Amino acid sequence: MTHSQSKQTISSTTPNVQKFKRTADTSQANSSKTELDTAARRDAERLAEERIRYDPDVLMMAYPWDEAAKDVPVKSAELVTKALESFLPSSAADEVLTLPPELDKPALRERLTSLANEFKPWLLPLGDDAADKLCKEKPIYSYFRDVVLFVMECLKKLHTGNDVPEHYRLLLLNSTGSDSKGKDSTQGFKVDQVLVLRPWNDGIGQGVKEWRYANILAVAEAKVPDNVPAVKKKGASPGFNLSSSVGVTLPTNLRAAQGQMLCYSRQMYESQPNRIFLWGLTFCGSLARVYCSGPDCVLSSADLDLRTPNGRRLFVEWLVFMSMGEDEQRGFNPAVRFVDSKAHGKHWIIDVPVLADEGYDSGCDDAVTSYSRGPTVVAGSSFGRNTRGFPATRDVNRIDKPNVFVKTAWQHAERGPNSTRLSELDCLKLIKKEFGNGEDGIHVPILVAGG
């Protein structure tokens, strides 16, 4: 029996996961798919109200962790922000376009100009010609898509050639705008918009036509502001400024957006066996929020007002850092990695710290490496431990004949012999000690590693 709970990373390309089908309980057996989906949405809205907490530092979780390598993504974010701002003049006197020299190339200028002309209504104070568009959800998704394309075009120009780090990823959205369904979806409902992780050398175009839950970074949900009539006034805010104080009642449409985001994100845990926390986005008019969802709660940023330079800067930084950051910052477990090799096909590599007889040493650099085609026990809840189970082998040449079972996402490695409540790891160590290798006809799993 193997167990893994190390610090955690991401893999941007994930295979279809072999898994047992979940069955509904008796009370739901006669319910239609629509009723089940409606119940899931209501449950997600309840969880949003109970679990979402404001955290002023949530955006810092995306900031580069590697002190030695942070200068490149930070500088890139500055250049992309300057490029974006050059298309958003604050007055008629600022109409002259001044791109940063690194991005001032004729073909790129033409492409960026085309994209900026599309998303300007979203990022500038509203006039009579744009107000009606922001009173509908669908244009918001198109604006969001075009901003993301703008950022990716700039990053691709800044970072080309063979020196691009392996962990860089393109972030692309569904090119159709909104309301699409993942090819691997097990849910009945469609998702409004998703950020998809793609290899750096992929084309950008208008985004992706098809997507899978296995390959997405975040779900995005947009709503019109609650105060829709006020939005139609020239120069009015296309959203509402929300207090971050504890106990403040959030506007109805924002709460609905948060609930749908959680509902649609749930399958990411099921389809990504190495996912340990999730990112998400909501938009209410031109106000954006970024979320980071963990085992017990969801951390929410304050409103990012995309009509202001500071709001746009923070939003661009998040996109750049997610694109250029390490897999761990995107929410993936570095100890569980997907590989597609010519010799052994698509499979997972899982590193588990060695468990000595006297106990687990968290500082130990040694690890038992196992190989698996994929989990047979999958995760799938918005919160909790999201345990996965992988039939595996320590010999990659025998990957289709697994002889160990790797369990991931245990909450505690061990509590110690003096604890009144033993952890699972403690229990397995006790089983090994008491029963050994199946003496007296008793056969139990043998614990070979854990952490």
Image: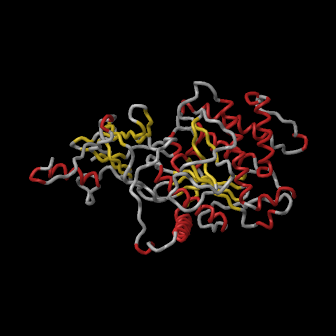
Quarter occupied by the C terminus? top left
Instruction: Kindly indicate the quadrant of the structure image that contains residue 165.
Output: top right
Which residue of the protein is positioned furthest toward the left in this rendering? 440
* Number of numbered callouts drawn: 0
- Residue extending farthest right: 93
Residue 262 in the image: state x and y as whole percent: 55, 59
Q: Is residue 299 above or below residue 340?
A: below
Q: Nearer the viewer, residue 437 or 199?
A: 199
Is 385 placed left or right of 321 in the picture? left
As displayed, is residue 411 above or below residue 199? Answer: below
Where's residue 134, x and y in %?
A: 77, 58
The answer to whether residue 64 is left or right of residue 310 is left
- In the rendered image, residue 260, in percent from the top left (x then y), is placed at 59, 62
Name the residue nearer the viewer: 444 or 450.
444
Residue at horizontal 80 percent and vertical 35 percent from the top = 110
Quarter assignment of residue 72? top right
Residue at (34%, 52%) from the top-left corner? 412
Q: List x then y, in percent, for residue 35.
A: 53, 71
